[in-house]
Every structure is written in structure tokens, then in C-alpha cells.
Amino acid sequence: MSVGWGFVGTGGIARTVARALELADGGELVAVCSRGADRARAFADEHGAAGAYDDVAALLADPAVDAVYVATTHPQHHAPARAALLAGTPVLVEKPMTVTAAATRDLVATARERGVFCMEAYWTRFLPLTRELLDVVASGAIGEVLSVHADLGFPAPESARRFHDPAIGGGSLLDLGPYPVGLALTLLGTPSAVRAAGSLTRSGVDRQVALALSWESGAVAALSTTIAAHASSRAWIEGDAGWIDVDAPLHSGRRFTVHRRGSAEPEVRENPVEHGHRFMLEHVHECLAAARTESPLVPLDFSVDLADVFEQALRQVGAARADELG
């Protein structure tokens, strides 16, 4: 069975995922929804979809729509995702799932109460090299993971509204944070403490954030995001028997190097791919075919943990934020 996708939103990330869907097995774009009917029709025509709507309810009523991908700006994720869940339609929500922990918890609770599939679009988890990286860690090649270091960032001019306007979820952490923070949570699970320091832009959103996370096991993570500086945008994972360097940009899934204690030569792993979102889409297709209500690789608890880290960090640095649950 081919999954008929309805997209809510027609911005840059929707175009990226639409191109990936054309290459993915098991699904096709059948309908598009945008606030402007003309934009919806243009996007639908560009990607070969029959349906074009300016209303989410109309999209959900389209019998060809089997699943919904929400690709609006961050603060507009909650409403269409919740509408899809209430309609019994599986939903993939662009990251971050929402801009508040309360809104994320509401979607998670709704999905579980209704028994409807819901997943955050943490696409890098499904890249072949990410899977290989996690397999290397699980094999014990670097021993017990004791610390994770990761940063991501670049200067974003004030004219780039996506990064600077609090009304649309601007700031470095919500936009870039899912990559470094998500890596740490994937490797180490739910942190026991979150500490943050940062600075703000003139619009009040977080300009840069430095995070220190800790776990009951004694593991720690040092993570940062910035829209003011040129970050190294790489990661390294330290264990008691070696370490792993992840090449920049850390979310590209192109190359990492394993350094084993006692080994003279590091081991380089490479597996660059194009249109990497297709692996996430194929995973969703597999989940739906198996009648799963959440992903075993990006479970809903991961999204709650991610939202909690962001919530605590943004409160600690005093960033201006949009309210998504009103």
C-alpha cells in the first residue's frame, strides 16, 4: 500500500521533504494545505498532488490523505497536528514538535489516547551513518559513553525573520538545538539536570545558548547553539575506551571517525547520501504498515524530553517565546 501524504505548509522544509518523498518507497504526495489557496495550488502542481486546500479540515476530509506532515513555522505545529490526531490521521510533525513543553505533552497525550501514530521529524536519526554510529557505540567500541560535546551555528542576519522573530519561534535553540541536543538524548536518554547560559538578540530571542546536561549515571553533555558566530558544527562522543569524532555539519550524516584505546589507527566511516529525509519517510511508512502508533526509534518520550530541555534552557536565559497552547 502506498501512503497518501497531505502536507500542511509550503515553505522550504516542505519542499525538501517533498523532494525526498519522490525518492522514498511506499508513499506519495496527494494533497497540500497552505494559508493561501494559490500557494497550495502552486506547490501541489509542482509536486504532482491532486488536492490543494487553504483549510486543514478540508485536507483531512480528503479521502486520499492517509497521513499528514506538518511543516508550518514552529508555533503553528500544534493546531494542525492535534486536528489530524483527533481525526484519526497519522501525523509527522516537523521539529521541534512544538515551542512549549505543554503543547508537546498535549500532542503526545492526544496521540496515545486516540491510538494514532505521531512522530517528530527528527530525520537525522534515520540516516544510514547515524544508525552505524549508534551500532558502533552499542558494540562497546569506545566503552561506556561518559560525555557528549556538540555545537551548531552560524551568523543569521536580522533580516532572516525565521531566526529573529519570537512570534514564529525564532532563536538558536528551537531551530538548531534538535541536532546537538537530540544526539545527546539519543545516546544517553533522559537527563537529570539542565543548566543553561546564553545571550539574547535585540528582538529578545536566544542569540546563543550553552547547555550543560547531566545524567544519574554520571554522564554529562556540553552543547551549544548560536545564530551569532561561526560554530565548528561538529560533535564528539567520549567513552572510557575511546572516542568518536563526528564531522561537520553534525547533522549531515556524512562521516565519523572512531578512536579506540590501544589502537594506532583511527577508523573512518563514511556514507554520504542525498535527500536524507527519505529514510525518515520510509520509516514512517513501515510503522504505518505495521500498525504502530509510535516509532521505536524516535518515540514520543524522546519528544517530551527534547521539549523539556528546551523549556528549561529558554526560561533560564530569559528568551522571548511564542505561546502555542492557548
Image (tube, rainbow, N blue to C red):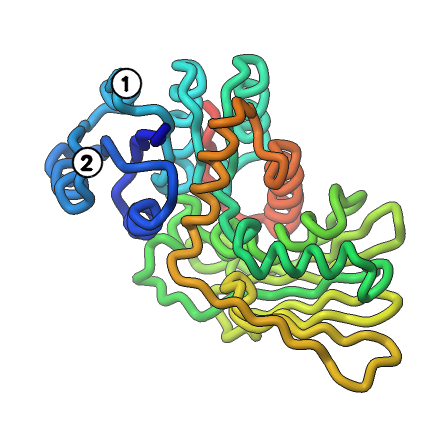
Q: Residue at x 73, y 61 (%)?
A: 136
In the image, residue 286 sits, relative to residue 196, either above or below, namely above
Amino acid carrying label 2: it is Ala
Give the number of marks. Answer: 2
Amino acid carrying label 1: it is Ala
Mark identifier at residue 288: none
Work out whether residue 292 can be spotted.
yes
Residue 134 placed where, x, y %? Answer: 69, 55
Residue 242 placed where, x, y %? Answer: 82, 71
Q: Secondary structure at mark 1?
A: helix
Q: Which quadrant of the structure image shows residue 257?
A: bottom right
> Do the numbered discs 1 and 2 sit on residues whose CB atoms are within 8 Å?
no
Q: Residue at x 24, y 19 (%)?
A: 62
Give 267 or 213, whichever is nearer the viewer: 267
Label 2 environment density (alpha carbons within 10 Å; few <14, some 14–19, many ≥20): many
Q: Which quadrant of the structure image shows residue 79?
A: top left
Quadrant in which the N terminus is drawn: top left
Q: Secondary structure at mark 2?
A: loop
Give 269 or 239, whichever is nearer the viewer: 269
Q: Which quadrant of the structure image shows residue 27?
A: top left
Q: Which residue is mark 1?
A: 57
Work out whether residue 167 can be spotted.
no
Residue 263 placed where, x, y %? Answer: 83, 81
Q: Give the mark nearest the N terminus, 1 or 2.
A: 2
Q: Residue at x 13, y 41 (%)?
A: 45
Residue 279 placed where, x, y %? Answer: 46, 48
Tell whether 284 sits left or right of 178: left
Q: Which residue is mark 2?
A: 49
